[in-house]
């Protein structure tokens, strides 16, 4: 497994070192090595390609254990590698729920055996995601969990979330409470963003103020407790503004946005395409633009996929009966390049920071996110920033529910390196 | 015309006139002793009703039979659907049976559009969730044109739960397309705030509006909306927005009173009002058959070697 590789004349982007330079990068014995290690190494012509720290996804649903008909750890981590990821955070809404250490170990062990991508299990905030009582966080912290979330559901009671934020201070490492912020009563039965489009399509709405209210509540709790809050997949302009103000006041909060919320709007639902049904929903062009500028100015720290695989027959349903979510691991980088970097909204360095360095810090994913320095673990992505491709099934993921199906995206992963081994070579997963 | 009828947006103003004119010629068939023409002989029309319906299903069935089509009625209870078969698999089954037209009624908005991805036959939307009900809108337009002689410039109010009404959506789109002035009236919780983008006006003052109307179109109140806190009680709804006898008396003399049925007498419309001569609710039903004959004829009959009427 200890491959020796030289990526020759790659454009190296490293947000930690602030580097953007064309040079050779040598990988040996699982680490970034100096030029002396390049003897006898496999030489890869990387002219015109970008070499960056491997991508890190803070928000992946791997579905195993329990819903292996949607995705497995083997297929999900292979999809992650194909998308340039070397680490993903696996959400806790498995069956059984990841609310105790045994599941944490199981998920991590299955991922290690698969070998495509490091997996950091996210622990549930509440037992069984029921929103009633706190899960045993301490046991999970000992098992390596650093992010807790009831994702898919908003922590329903302010009292419970406050308690979690305070309780988490007991741990010797920083633990992050990540909330899916949508007021449950306001979104009950809702299928899409509430507005002209939902009224015209006859679909029940999930109003933007449902997110605004939950974000405001969560920020108030983080401010009052000094706890460490992370907000999942922001979707509305007002939420971005609330986070911007809270950060200015010193509230300990980070936030993420998905590629699909950066790319699409509620107008894209006119054909009742269930692969564009997601929670929180796609909103208006104004919201999308606020998300873009929030990501550019650092109000939003992270791009996370919310990779949510479903079986074909589950998505091939009436719109109101289909489950929410889109897969995203294989298209995240290309979507960010196509919609943000190439049009000049985001610098390439900021894109890499949001897709790799920032989530690696939040996740405590040591060895991921850079720096690309001699002696560091070789977790890397090498991509062609301008190659155009048509998104269409089949995917490396077991699922097909991609909101990007039919889109021509620009930017394609050529190589992914996990601790010195190629998990993707010439665009194809090796595991 | 489009291959399918999913939404009033599928039709141009010229299409609407053509459909109404064709219905005019078919209405005479309904007054014959032998109420049948051979226009769709040998064609198969499937009435695929996944939601309870009496008048629309019977209306489509009669329309297809009067055109001599073979008609299959397929509803949720007692079919493969009740055994858990998906919409897609049911659609593929209907496709394999060679349906020339599928008339679909479904509780999910957008399901007729989804159906077109899986079948080759013509799809007619007979009401989908809270989205649209275009054949109802067309028969209403037919009735208005017949009674008032025109559609352009008509002042129409649609009263009630516009938010959840597929009839209100289709009728608004249809009336606006034909140059009528539409005002949506009801509790503010049940009127989409963005309705002006549809070309309609919004009002919460039914009493100020009634004396200026050519058409007062009353929607059915779904009593379950009260549970969801859209209004405090049926009693209060009737008091604030019901078409009472006193209110109906303020309508201009020739104004029409319409309702898509089934009515909640005493709630959105007083019994006396429903039975007034200005009320054309029964004629709406009769005209529905002619409109559906026209649509089946224009969509299915026009697309092959069907004989003309």
Image: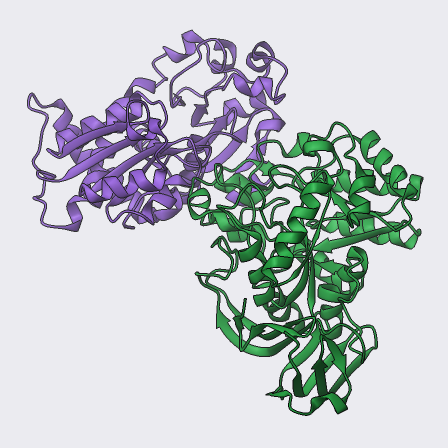
Chain colours: A green, B purple
Classify residue A84 as left or right of residue A123.
left
Instruction: Examine the image and state in which quarter residue A285 appears.
Output: bottom right
Q: Residue at x 50, y 47 (%)?
A: A70
> From what the image shows, is residue B118 above or below residue A361?
above
Locate residue A390, reporting x and y percent: 47, 69
Residue A408 is left or right of residue A162, and the answer is left
Q: Is residue B211 left or right of residue B73?
A: right
**Number of numbered discs visible in the structure rendering:** 0
Q: Position of residue B150 (x, y in %)?
A: 34, 36
Q: Is residue B199 visible?
A: no
Quadrant for residue A353, please give it. Answer: bottom right
Please state, as top left, top right, bottom left or bottom right, where the N terminus of chain A lies in the image: bottom right
Q: Is residue A232 above or below residue B202?
A: below
- The answer to which of B253 and A253 lies nearer the viewer is A253
Q: Is residue A187 left or right of residue A179?
A: left
Judge whether A430 appears above or below A51 on screen.
above
Q: Is residue A48 above or below residue A243?
A: below
Q: Nearer the viewer, residue B220 or A81?
A: A81
Residue B99 on image: x %, y %: 20, 41
Which one is nearer the viewer's eye here, A303 or A370? A370
Residue B252 makes an appearance in the image = yes
Q: Residue at x 38, y 20 (%)?
A: B261
Decide which of A36, A184 is in the foreground and name it.
Answer: A36
Which of the image's four quarters has the C terminus of chain A?
bottom right
């Amino acid at each position: 497994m200890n491959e020796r590789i030289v990526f020759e004349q790659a454009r190296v982007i490293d947000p930690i070192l602030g580097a953007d330079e064309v040079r050779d990068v040598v990988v040996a014995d699982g680490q970034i090595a100096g030029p002396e290690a390049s003897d006898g190494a496999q030489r890869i012509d990387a002219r015109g390609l970008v070499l960056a720290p491997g991508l890190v996804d803070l928000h992946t649903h791997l579905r195993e254990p329990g819903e292996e008909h949607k995705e497995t750890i083997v297929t999900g981590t292979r999809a992650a590698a194909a998308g340039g990821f070397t680490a993903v955070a696996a959400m806790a809404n498995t069956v059984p729920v990841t609310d105790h250490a045994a599941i944490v170990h199981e998920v991590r062990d299955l991922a290690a055996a698969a070998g495509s991508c490091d997996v950091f299990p996210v622990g549930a905030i509440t037992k069984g995601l029921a929103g009633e009582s706190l899960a045993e966080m301490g046991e999970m912290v000992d098992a390596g969990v650093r992010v807790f979330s009831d994702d898919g559901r908003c922590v329903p009671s302010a009292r419970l979330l406050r308690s979690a934020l305070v309780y988490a201070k007991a741990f010797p490492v920083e633990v992050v409470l990540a909330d899916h912020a949508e007021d449950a009563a306001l979104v009950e039965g809702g299928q899409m963003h509430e507005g002209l489009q939902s009224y015209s399509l006859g679909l029940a709405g999930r109003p933007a103020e449902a997110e605004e209210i939950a974000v405001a509540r969560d920020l108030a709790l983080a401010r009052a407790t000094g706890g460490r809050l992370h907000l999942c997949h922001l979707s509305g302009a007002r939420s971005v503004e609330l986070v911007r103000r809270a950060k200015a006041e010193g509230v300990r909060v980070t936030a993420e946005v998905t590629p699909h919320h950066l790319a699409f709007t509620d107008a894209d639902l006119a054909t009742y395409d269930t692969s564009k049904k997601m929670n929180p929903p796609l909103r208006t062009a104004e919201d999308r633009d606020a998300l873009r500028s929030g990501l550019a100015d650092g109000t939003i720290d992270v791009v996370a996929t919310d990779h949510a695989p479903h079986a074909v027959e589950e998505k091939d349903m009436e719109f109101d009966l289909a489950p929410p979510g889109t897969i995203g691991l294989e298209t995240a980088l290309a979507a960010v390049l196509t919609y943000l970097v190439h049009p000049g909204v985001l610098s390439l360095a900021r894109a890499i920071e949001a897709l790799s360095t920032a989530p690696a810090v939040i996740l405590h994913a040591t060895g991921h996110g850079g720096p690309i320095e001699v002696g560091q673990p070789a977790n890397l992505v090498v991509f062609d920033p301008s190659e155009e491709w048509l998104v269409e099934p089949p995917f490396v993921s077991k699922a097909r529910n991609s909101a990007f199906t039919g889109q021509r995206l620009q930017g394609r992963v050529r190589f992914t390196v996990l601790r010195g081994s190629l998990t993707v070579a010439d665009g194809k997963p090796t595991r | 015309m489009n291959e399918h009828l999913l939404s009033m947006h599928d039709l141009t103003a010229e299409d609407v006139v053509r459909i109404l004119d064709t219905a005019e010629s078919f209405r005479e068939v309904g007054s014959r002793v032998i109420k049948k023409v051979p226009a769709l002989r040998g064609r198969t029309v499937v009435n695929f009703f996944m939601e309870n319906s009496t008048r629309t299903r019977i209306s489509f069935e009669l329309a297809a039979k009067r055109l001599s089509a073979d008609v299959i009625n397929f509803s949720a209870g007692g079919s493969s659907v009740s055994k858990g078969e998906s919409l897609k698999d049911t659609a593929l089954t209907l496709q394999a049976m060679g349906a020339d037209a599928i008339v679909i009624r479904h509780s999910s908005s957008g399901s007729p559009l989804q159906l077109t991805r899986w079948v080759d036959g013509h799809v007619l939307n007979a009401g989908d969730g809270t989205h649209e009900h275009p054949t109802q809108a067309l028969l209403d337009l037919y009735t208005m044109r017949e009674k008032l002689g025109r559609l352009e410039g008509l002042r129409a109010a649609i009263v009630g739960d516009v938010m959840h009404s597929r009839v209100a959506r289709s009728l608004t789109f249809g009336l606006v397309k034909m140059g009528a002035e539409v005002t949506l009236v009801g509790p503010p919780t049940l009127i989409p705030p963005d309705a002006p983008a549809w070309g309609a006006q919004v009002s919460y003052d039914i009493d100020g509006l009634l004396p200026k109307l050519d058409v007062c179109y009353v929607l059915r109140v779904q009593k379950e909306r009260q549970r969801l806190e859209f209004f405090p009680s049926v009693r209060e709804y009737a008091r604030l927005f019901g078409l009472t006898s006193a209110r109906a008396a303020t309508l201009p003399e020739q104004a029409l009173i319409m309702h898509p049925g089934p009515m909640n007498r005493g709630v959105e419309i007083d019994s006396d009002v429903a039975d007034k001569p200005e009320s054309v609710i029964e004629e709406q039903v009769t005209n529905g058959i002619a409109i559906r004959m026209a649509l089946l004829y224009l969509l299915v009959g026009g697309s092959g070697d069907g004989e003309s009427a």
